[in-house]
């Protein structure tokens, strides 16, 4: 198999973890006889510094002409004072919108060897395996108007029926191939958009008779994620709620550095990135955890290239490296084998 992959390292630790992902993919390609070609592009703060815009046209064109996209991270203190429309994060939002990457998949899997790293009790988090499906191109982040009006501000939460239908169907489809349980999260007791969301879930559910489904208000879902996370299989929700709940759920693993994600369109290239940010405070120090980026590459093999065996091999390699006691600083406990970003990557490649 021959595939072109757009690599957008971005800012902060993004360059370090993106390099880790490409190293692992090269090892997989060598082992299975695949040819992965990588083409780099600018995004975020580094793109602003070099071109004046957080998403240059050249980068967008590279992404459109690629089979999949790997993204490191965007943003940092350096650009915090820029006007909102010129911030690094706008480049990522524009990329998602331009490629119609409407479905964000965030798996939350607690590895037994890391369960003690969570702030929650071992018995609560050990064995957690859930998927948050977040609508990514609509809602509050994209609604118009979004502006200041003197001493008042306006942000608009807007959805179309079609936008809700396609993400709800994606949630049901994923539940079908997992444990066949879907939880739809909304705020239907307050928001009209959520009432429409809930109505659409009820309309679509009969198409998936093998999936057990339930509705939860977002505040209750946030509480239940802490009280009993193992009750969840697939959670589907809108943009803002999904953003918050997935970050909350991430802490079950003990570190944002362990969580991958995929952003999918109906028929174009998928975008794969770690959930963590650019962490400018540790950039260039070899302290970044590359495992979320490496696991994002595994998701790319699975969802964009349908290379399930290769994806599973990466996942198993990560499990074995963690079982062997190797840790970057964010997940290190007493007596751990403390390693750098590069050394952790080398251990995964060796395990492959």
Image (tube, grey):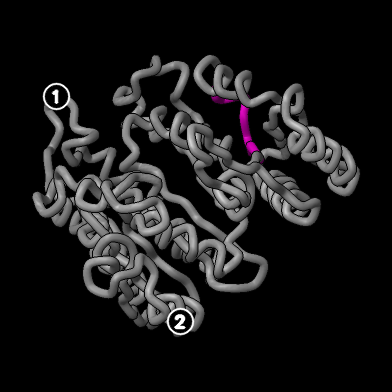
Residue at 19% x, 47% y: name it: 280
Residue 306 visible here: no
Apparent side of residue 132 relative to residue 168 in the rendered image (left or right):
left
In the displayed orientation, state which residue is furthest to the front: 150
Provide the residue designation for mark 2.
61
Q: Are marks 1 and 2 in contact (CB under 8 Å)?
A: no
Q: Position of residue 170 (x, y in %)?
A: 70, 52
Residue at image location 35% in from the left, 82% down from the top: 37
Q: Nearer the viewer, residue 17 or 149?
A: 149
Task: Specify few, some or many for label 2: CA neighbours under 10 Å numbering under 14, 14-19, or 20 or more.
Answer: few
Q: Is 231 covered by the magenta stretch? A: yes
Label 1 belongs to which residue?
A: 334
Q: Is residue 322 above or below residue 102?
A: above
Q: Is residue 67 above or below residue 141?
A: below
Q: Secondary structure at mark 1?
A: loop
The residue stretch that appears in magenta? 229-236
Query: Which of 172/349 is in front?
Result: 172
């Amino acid at each position: 198999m021959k595939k072109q992959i757009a690599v957008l390292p971005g800012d902060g630790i993004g360059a370090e973890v993106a390099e880790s992902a490409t190293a692992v993919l090269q090892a997989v390609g060598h082992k299975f006889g695949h040819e992965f070609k990588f083409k780099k592009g600018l995004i975020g703060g580094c793109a602003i510094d070099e071109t004046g815009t957080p998403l240059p046209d050249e980068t967008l064109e590279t992404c459109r002409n690629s089979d999949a996209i790997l993204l490191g991270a965007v943003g940092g203190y350096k650009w915090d004072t820029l006007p909102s429309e010129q911030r690094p994060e706008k480049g990522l939002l524009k990329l998602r919108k331009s490629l119609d990457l409407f479905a964000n998949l965030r798996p939350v899997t607690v590895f037994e060897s890391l369960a003690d790293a969570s702030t929650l009790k071992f018995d609560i988090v050990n064995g957690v395996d859930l998927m948050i499906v977040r609508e990514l191109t609509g809602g509050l982040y994209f609604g118009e108007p979004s502006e200041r009006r003197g001493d008042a501000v306006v942000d608009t939460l807007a959805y179309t029926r079609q936008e809700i239908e396609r993400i709800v169907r994606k949630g049901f489809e994923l539940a079908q191939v997992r444990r066949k349980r879907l939880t739809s999260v909304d705020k239907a007791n307050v928001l009209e958009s959520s009432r429409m969301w809930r109505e659409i879930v009820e309309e679509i559910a009969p198409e998936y008779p093998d999936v057990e489904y339930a509705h939860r208000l977002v505040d209750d879902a946030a509480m239940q994620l802490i009280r009993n996370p193992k009750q969840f299989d697939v959670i589907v929700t809108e943009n803002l709620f999904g953003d918050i709940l997935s970050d909350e759920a991430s802490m079950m693993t003990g570190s944002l550095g362990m969580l991958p994600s995929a952003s999918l369109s109906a028929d174009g290239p998928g975008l794969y990135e770690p959930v963590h940010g650019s962490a400018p405070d540790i950039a260039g120090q070899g302290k970044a955890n590359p495992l979320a980026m490496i696991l994002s590459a595994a998701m790319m093999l699975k969802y964009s290239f349908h290379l399930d065996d290769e994806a599973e091999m990466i996942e198993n390699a990560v499990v074995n490296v963690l079982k062997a006691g190797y840790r970057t600083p964010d997940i290190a406990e007493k007596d751990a084998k403390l390693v750098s970003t590069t050394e952790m990557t080398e251990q995964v490649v060796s395990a492959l």
